[in-house]
Each structure stands twice: as C-alpha cells, then as structure tokens.
Image (spheres, rainbow, N blue to C red):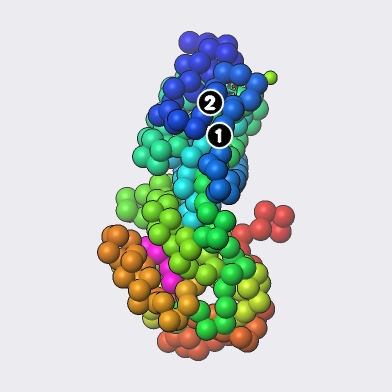
Amino acid sequence: MSLSEFELIRTYFYGATGERDDVVLGIGDDCALLRPRAGELVAAGMDTLVAGRHFREDVAPETLGHKALAVNLSDLAAVGAEPAWATLSLTLPRADTTWLAAFMQGFSALATAHGVQLVGGDTTRGPLSITVQVQGFVDESAALKRSAGHAGDRLLVSGTLGDAGLALQYAHAGKPVDAELRERLDRPTPRVTLGRLLAGQANAAIDISDGLLADLGHICAGSGTGAHIELDRLPLSAAVRDVAAAGDWSAPLGGGDDYELLFSVDPARLDEIVHLCRSAGERVAEIGELVQADGIKLIGPEECVVEGVPSGFDHFRD
Ligand code: ADP
Ligand code: MG
C-alpha cells in the first residue's frame, strides 16, 4: 500500500500519544502551540539515530521507536526534568507502513508511560535517520548540571554498567548475545524517576551514553575536579563481572549506550540521598569521589591512573 506524505502523517502521528492539557495545538498546523509552566525552566534536548551508525540495520522497528525516545528522555533525566513534549523528524527510504506502525508502537508506548505528547515533526525521504527532540520542565534552582560537582562529593551511579557495551562487543565479534544483554542495548530504560528525585538534591549529574570514563570526564571538566573510581564497587551484571574478572574492563569503563545516571552528592547528604533513591525502588551504587587533583584515578585490583580525560565515542575521530 502506498500512502501520500499527508496520509502517512495522519495515520501514524496524529493521536500517537496521549494528550496533555498544556498542548494548545498539536500535530496538524505549521507549529505546535505549547504552554510552558509558569516559574519553571523548559529543558530541551535532541538526539539523532542514523542507520548503520547508531543501530544495526536488522534492529526491530519497534525497538528503534523505543530507543529513539528513550535516549532523549535520558537527557531530560540527567538534568532532573519532568518530560512533557516531543517532536520527531523521520527520514525514510520508502513509505513502509509495516515498519512505521511498529516504530510508532515502540515510540508511543514509552511516550505514554512518561506522559509525553508527540506535538509535531517532519517526514522526508532519504537514508533512514531518526531525530527526536524533547522538552520538559525543571525548577531553575533544582536543575542538575555537569558543572555542579565539588571536590569531596561522593560519586554514584544507577543500574549496572557495561551491559550495552558488552552486547555491542559480542554483536561485532559475531558472538551470540543473550536476551538480557541485548535488551539493555536495544531498549534502554531512561532513569526519569531517579532524575526527578535527584533534582535539587544531587550536585553534578550526567547520563552515561559514551561510557563511564568519558562521561565522568565531562563532569570533571565542567566541575574543575578529578575523580577516584573504586573498580570493585562498580555495579556489574553477572555477564560483565565475568569479563572484568578476566581483566577486561572495557565494557564497564568505556562501553556506551547504558543510559544510566552518574551523579555526585555532598558527602554530608550521602546516606539521606541514597535512602531517598532506594526507598523509591531506584538502584544506586556509590563508586568513588570527586577530588581536587587532575585526571581520573582507577583504584582497583591493580591501581592505575588514566592520563588526562579519557575520551569516549567521537563521531569525527577515525
Ligand atoms: P509543514 O510543511 O508546514 O512543515 P508538514 O506537512 O511537514 O508541515 O507537516 C504537517 C503536520 O504534521 C505538522 O504539524 C507537523 O508537525 C506534523 N508532522 C509531520 N511529520 C511528523 C512526524 N514525523 N511526527 C510528528 N508529526 C509530524
Ligand atoms: Mg508549514
């Protein structure tokens, strides 16, 4: 079945998500008209997924729809914002209705779970590429930033580290990837609830999209600190623990795509904040601290110092 651009938009995007009171005009006009919340900041973020670069061509479209929104919600979580609106720019090789229906199912299920309304977008023809923009709300005084860490802060991380990176390593090596690891790569859980809890409580925060060391490097650069990481305190799944025990720490330290939150807290408030997170059912682990010295020091089975700020994935570096 071949649909016109307008029919595609009407069929797959109109009413794709629940409706919010603060959307005065949604999909269908030249712009959406949105009512920001008085007294709060609008947090805006955007992420693009390009076929062959950010996802394997064989990934199920439902999974892609989930991931395209999840990575954006993760950015909102990292600043402590409450998600509200999304726009979606889709470049498609052809009007494949089966693909679109499945993609929108994944997108809509996650949007609805977080009370996000799709309010507009753009649909064009070309090599498959997906761009999502999200907006949310956060109190000015509570917004979390990469630059707000202090020497002496304790460092914490949510969930487990390196699962997505290990799944990707296995996939590249042509090894079988078990379902749990693959799920962590394909269907990340944005830590929105945790981000909301941490707003106004934590100091610095970032979501881990490029690997622990690279994203910690951003906190250190922004905050003017170094950091110590205790390797044996890193929260690891059994699969990642086995690989690390054999001496390969590349997945938990350098693997991207985990979308966990890394954050720093005032040491005097550590117990209180950990309790706050855990009593809300959020898994967090203390993994080290921000320090006055430069660089990131890994304290572990074998002590080593990572010179300078380690870099993560960089699109423009070969
Ligand atoms: P215009 O030509 O004025 O930019 P379009 O014809 O591109 O408008 O889009 C018509 C309406 O459909 C607009 O409200 C636009 O935001 C919405 N829209 C188009 N593509 C998408 C999409 N991929 N997701 C959500 N809304 C979309
Ligand atoms: Mg127009």
In the rendered image, residue 263, in percent from the top left (x then y), is placed at: 49, 68
Residue positioned 44% across, 22% down in the render = 15
Residue positioned 49% across, 23% down in the render = 13
Which residue in the structure is indicated by mark 1?
A: 35
Q: Do the residues labelled 2 and 1 touch (CB within 8 Å)?
A: yes
Query: Whereabouts is ligand 2, in terms of quadrant?
Result: top right
Viewer can see residue 269:
yes
Judge by depth and name the residue closer to the eye, 228 or 313. Answer: 228
Give the left or right position of residue 82, taking residue 296 as reference: left
* Secondary element at tag 2: strand
Residue positioned 61% across, 59% down in the render = 313
Judge by depth and name the residue closer to the eye, 306 or 24. Answer: 24
In the rendered image, residue 267, in percent from the top left (x then y), is placed at: 45, 81
- 10 Å crowding of disc 2: few (<14), some (14-19), many (20+): few
- 10 Å crowding of disc 1: few (<14), some (14-19), many (20+): few
Q: Earlier in the sequence, mark 2 or mark 1?
A: 2
Q: Label 2 amino acid? A: Val
Give the left or right position of residue 74, taking residue 91 as reference: left
The label shown at residue 292 is none
Above/below status of 47 relative to 12: below
Q: Label 1 amino acid? A: Arg
Which residue in the structure is indicated by mark 2?
A: 24
Q: Which range of residues does the magenta coloring cover?
A: 155-159
Q: Is residue 275 magenta?
A: no
Above/below status of 304 relative to 173: below
* Secondary element at tag 1: loop
